Amino acid sequence: MTSIIAELSELEHKELQGSGLYNADLAPVAAAERKWRAFSFAALWISMSACIPTYMLASSLIGGGMNWWQAVLTIFLGNLIVLVPMVLNAHAGTKYGIPFPVYCRASFGTKGANIPAVLRALVACGWFGIQAWIGGDAIYRICAVIFHIHLAPAHNFFGITPGQFLCFMFFWGINMFVIYKGIDTIRFLLNIKAPLLIALGLALLGWAYVQAGGFGPMLSQPSAFAAGQPKAGQFWSYFFPALTGMVGFWATLSLNIPDFSRYAVSQKDQALGQALGLPLTMALYSFIGVAVTSATTVIYHETLWNPVDVLTRFKNPGVLIVAMLALVIATLATNIAANVVSPANDFAHLAPQKISFRMGGLITGIIGILMMPWKLIADPNGYIFTWLIAYSALLGPVGGILIADYFVYRRRTFDLKQLYVTDGAYSFTGGVSLTAVIALVAGVLPSIPGFLVNVKLMSATAAPAAVVHLYNYAWFTGFAIAFVLYLALRRMTGAQK
């Protein structure tokens, strides 16, 4: 990969300041301001991967029937796969210093770029809500210990109690305050977050080792797919959709990685840092989730896949409060870095002259509440098969289009100034690339019948079984179809549509 850095001159920056496609947050980062080395990217991924959703990802596979090594291997393979588009899409950010929404303009058009930007932003809103819910739930459990509150299930339409909602909103408010304070506060949180959550994870692992009587009992739980077990012979029918879900876990970041790689010193730094930081950290932290979840089956005779539920079983109030506070701080840092920075840029792209980074962050937070995140992670199957796979069906085709355009059609060459000009080389048809829109729709369509069956809006017999099963491979089929169709249409229609 070439390490050549392209940038606008000071005169070009001044010329573009009156453009409706330009503002300080979306402008290319100057070469002198790009300071992220390989260690910075490795640290970023270690920090973002060591999070509660990673723990829940692994333990949800245990809940679905896998044994410990099947779950860890599935997660490791999924992250090796998603690392490829991650590094490829990061290339444009490093070379041109542009964020994700601007990167999309070359393939989707100066206005059409709002389509992938909004799709990605809405998924981030869901993740923001999930992380905010996890943090708020931890605060609620701390309050229950301090004030001796009896934890009772909710019996209303929303599925949560007033106390849970108040704690959720309190943690949500802390997130909004950090966004308001800016990037320096976010960087500070990231610096302390990774050690906190890794220490908490290792402490949980040590506790589980002692309570379960060693790793033998913890990891001896058989796979539900083994001979004589309840799901015997069904492993592959579970593995492939699970693998799709693992790819989908970071499908968001595999698109908007330019939001971070625009600060890289070189292509080598971003590629090496990501390769070192992502797959291994995900495997390690997922192993902690798998081991502790397996241990809860031995200790409590039930599978506790949420670490907050595990922590509430601790008898010592001091230990519980310290552990929960560590979880809250760590969750806050992950949420801001992974689920606010990029959608804030995406929403700012809708109206660069009117929506700032802070306003974009507020929009992200509000939508995150409206999506009722506690329902997205209510059970392991819904977490993987409804949430992770469903949005991978949307984002896979976007990734296919971006990589096909940048690496194959344009051969890693943009006219940087034209990306900020409304009637320039990337305006296509009224600012929208019909070629990209058609390829996107074609990539999503095959997954729709399976999604409707999965959420029980359509009978499984209403469509051919082969069509319904395509949903299990949503990211892969969508990526491939959009990649091939985009190139075919682009070569037929040229650069004008």
Image: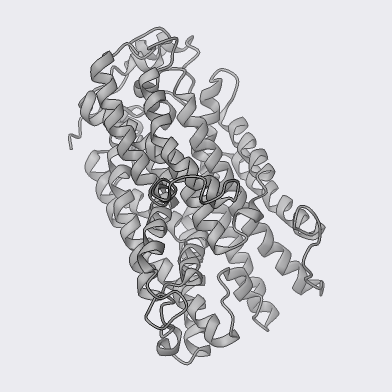
User: Is residue 354 toward the left or the right of residue 461 in the image?
Assistant: right
Choose between 12 and 116: the one closer to the eye. Answer: 116
Question: Where does the image place residue 219, in percent across and percent down from the top left?
Answer: 41, 83
Please say if 16 is above or below 206.
above
Task: Determine whether 270 is above or below 235 in the image.
Answer: above
Near-viewer residue (12 or 387)? 387
In the rendered image, which quarter contains the C terminus? top left
- Is residue 28 at all visible to an observer of this figure? no
Residue at coordinates 33% horizontally, 49% vertically from top-left? 82
Q: Is residue 460 visible?
A: yes
Instruction: Tell me: residue 90, above or below residue 310.
Output: above
What is the residue that sits farthest to the left in this orientation?
2
Q: Which residue appears at 33% of the width and 62% of the height?
A: 76
Asked if residue 143 lies left or right of residue 112, the reply is: right
Name the residue rendered at 45%, 25% in the picture: 26
Tell me: residue 80, above or below residue 216: above
Depth check, front residue: 24 or 215: 215
Residue 62 coordinates in the image, percent (x, y) = 47, 72
